[in-house]
Image: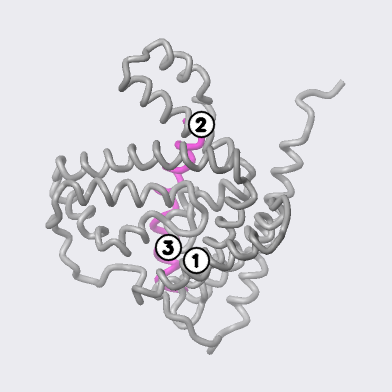
Amino acid sequence: MGAADIVPGVSGGTVALVLGIYDRLIGNIRLGARGLRQALTGDFSGVRRTLHDIEWIWLITLLAGILAAVATLSSVLERLLDDEPIAMAGLFFGLVVGTLWIAWSLLERVDAVTVGIIAGVGVLLFLVLGLRADTEVADGAAEVVTQPLWVFTLAGAIAICAMILPGISGSFILVLLGMYTEVLGAVNDRDYASLAAFSFGCVVGLAVFSTLLHWLLENYRNQVIAAMIGLMVGSMRVLWPWPNGTHTTRISAPADDVVLPIALALVGAATVIAVEHFSSRVGTMPDSLD
């Protein structure tokens, strides 16, 4: 999940969906949100019960893996994306195609409403992503804080949603909002007030959105899965290899070397399907053998 968030058109939520831990992740985040709400309202006995229900070992292990991936793979992935943008975009394009195959199998039914949601969400995200030609800030852009604290809070609340939604990374959300350099500027300048506002927004956004998403999955699961498929379809605008991989949202016909990107796309799709097949088999294995 940590490695996925580095890529503009992929998110940790996509990986969670592939591995079959998406509902488990949302459920634990929702429990954390409930505990926070109980603490704020003075229901400390409820807090103790909620904290007991959270799968702490599982969450800590997951978080450790995310942080380890960011620390060890971010420089490697960024270098590969810079040196081989078209080939790497082909690989990630294939990964999302494989995820779409898996997500499609999660649909309980495919009717006109389902297709309409997929098409509507996909087209909308496709158009939104086209509002900005580049997925990264320009070289030499000033990393300074110019926005008030409430803007940092709002940006954090919006960007954190990408962590649990398949389709787009939080860093690219910040680029679209024009807040990427602002957040980096706050980090570089040790502007603790702005960073605190951003973190507060992340906490509030994650708490509210995870609660809403859990309720939607409980009551409108098919429609939610359809919307997630639409998000992934729309995000493929960023992952289309041509003309310059994930560095741009512009799209063009395949040119120059097309064999390697297509081969990597096939490998990526096959890998995702194989991982999902393995994880589903592990998940259905009995705890013990008699």
Q: Residue at x 36, y 26 (%)?
A: 36
62 in magenta: yes
> Which mark is drawn over residue 28?
2
The magenta span reads: 60-84
Q: CA distance from mark 2 to mark 1?
A: 26 Å
Q: Residue at x 31, y 22 (%)?
A: 40
Give the secondary structure at mark 1: helix
- Residue, disc 3: 8
Q: Residues within 10 Å of mark 3 (few under 14, many from 20)?
A: many
> Which mark is drawn over residue 235?
1
Q: Could you tell me residue 73's position as x and y percent?
A: 44, 53
Residue contact at pointers 3 and 1, CB within 8 angstroms: no
Q: Earlier in the sequence, mark 3 or mark 1?
A: 3
Q: Residue at x 34, y 73 (%)?
A: 132
Q: Is residue 68 left or right of residue 152?
A: right
Outermost residue toward the top in this view: 45
Give the secondary structure at mark 3: loop
Q: 188 or 249, which lies in front?
A: 249
Q: Main secondary structure of the magenta part?
A: helix
Give the secondary structure at mark 2: helix
Q: Is residue 105 left or right of residue 232?
A: right
Q: Residue at x 52, y 54 (%)?
A: 166
Q: Could you tell me residue 173's position as x and y percent?
A: 36, 59
